[in-house]
Each structure stands twice: as structure tokens, then as C-alpha cells.
Image: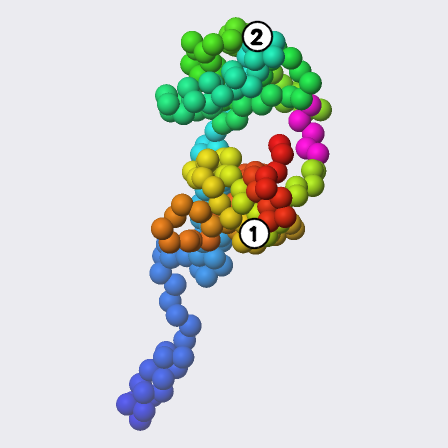
Amino acid sequence: MKMADDNKTNGQRSLAPEIKIKGAMTQEEVKEKDEYLKAEIKEEVVKEEKLDSPKTQIFAVRTTANREDQVMSFLVSNAERKGLEVYSVIRPHGMRGYIFIEALDRNSAEQSAYGIPYSRGVLPNIVNYKEIEHMLEQVKKEVNIQKNDIAEIISGPFKREKCKITRVDKQKGDVVVELLEAAVPIPITVKMDAVKVIRRDDDDSISE
């Protein structure tokens, strides 16, 4: 009888709830900690993304009147050659004697404009974007590009290359071209404003 009672007692003990180890977390606590860690990681990623995105500044460069385009060309070449942190060069329509540089800092802007013909230096004050925003309003212009046109690429890695237009996608603003001097014709997609039509089937040439 005693053995039977012991077996009965053992059976009851096996059905008893699990003993909680001191210091162990409950399932709710584990879940809360997991959510906290995920939120912390997400916050760190956002911080890193903000750090990766450089904060740029805009500077005005004074130029000789009617020489703005030449200064822009020299400035861009200078920035590329020196590997400067210059992101864009702007010439507002109708403004004479000034162009604007978007750069990481003043030093980058000044170095890009240093020693350039017709440049009169970078102005001391940083330009607020709102001051020139009204000059930079984008106006959509209808570009007359057709399939089979012969064009010249005017920007990007294939600049000055002659090409043939094989497809036009006006909705995306893209054209597919084939380089005329390539040994094997490979389709290349570029923006419509990156090509200039120079010849069409029904015309000998296209006037600028």
C-alpha cells in the first residue's frame, strides 16, 4: 500500500506546474525585451542614414557678365579633377553675373572656383535655398525625339557619342539608344534630356 501511495504521489508531482528559476524572464518579459531591441536597432539605422546623407550648402559665385556658362564649365571640370564635394552648379535663367554652387562646405566651393577665368570669387554669405527657389521652377518642355533619329549624347559617361534612337518612352522620360561606333550594338537607356537630335530620316539635319 505504501508503494502505491508513493506512485500516486509521484504521479501528482509530475502534473505539478514547472518550478520557476530565480532570475529567469517570463515569456511576456522576453517579448518586451525583443521589441525594445528591435526599436533600438531601427533607431540606430535611422541615425546612420542621417549621418550618411551629407548636409549641403549653397554659395554664390560672382562672375563677369555674360561669362556665366564658361565659368560653370570651368568650375565643373575643376571640381571633378580635384575630387571636390560639389554636387550641383546652378545658373538661374535671367540672372547675370552670378552662378550658384551646392557643395559640402565653403572650402569645397572656394577650391572649385579658385583660379577660374572670369570668376570673381565666392561671396561670404551662405545662400538660403528659399532665396533662389523661385528661379529654379521646373518647366516641362516638349522634346521632339522620334524613333530612328540620329542623336548626340550630351551628358553622362557616353557624352559626345553619336547614337540612333530605337525606342522613346515619353511617360518615363527615357530613350533607348544604340551607339553608332560600337562594334556590337547594345541598347542603352538614357534620359531624353541627355540626347540632342542631329539628324532625322526626312531631314538632312536638325537645327539647334
Give the residue at mark 1. 148
Give percent across and percent down for residue 87: 49, 27
What residue type is disc 2 on?
Thr
Q: Is residue 46 magenta?
A: no
Q: Badge 2, how many Cα within 10 Å: few under 14, some, many 20+? A: some
Q: Position of residue 7 (x, y in %)?
A: 32, 87
104 is higher (above) or lower (below) than 52: above
Q: Residue furthest left?
A: 3
Looking at the image, residue 152 lies above or below residue 9: above
Res 77 → quadrant = top left
Closer to the camera in the image, 206 or 64: 206
Magenta span dominant secondary structure = loop
Q: Quarter of the image containing the N terminus?
A: bottom left
In the image, taking residue 8 as reference, residue 48 lies left or right, namely right
Q: Which residues are magenta?
A: 135-139
- Let me know if residue 57 appears in the view: no
Task: Tell me which residue sits at (39%, 70%) in the image.
Answer: 18
**Which residue is drawn at the image coordinates 37% and 54% (left, top)?**
184
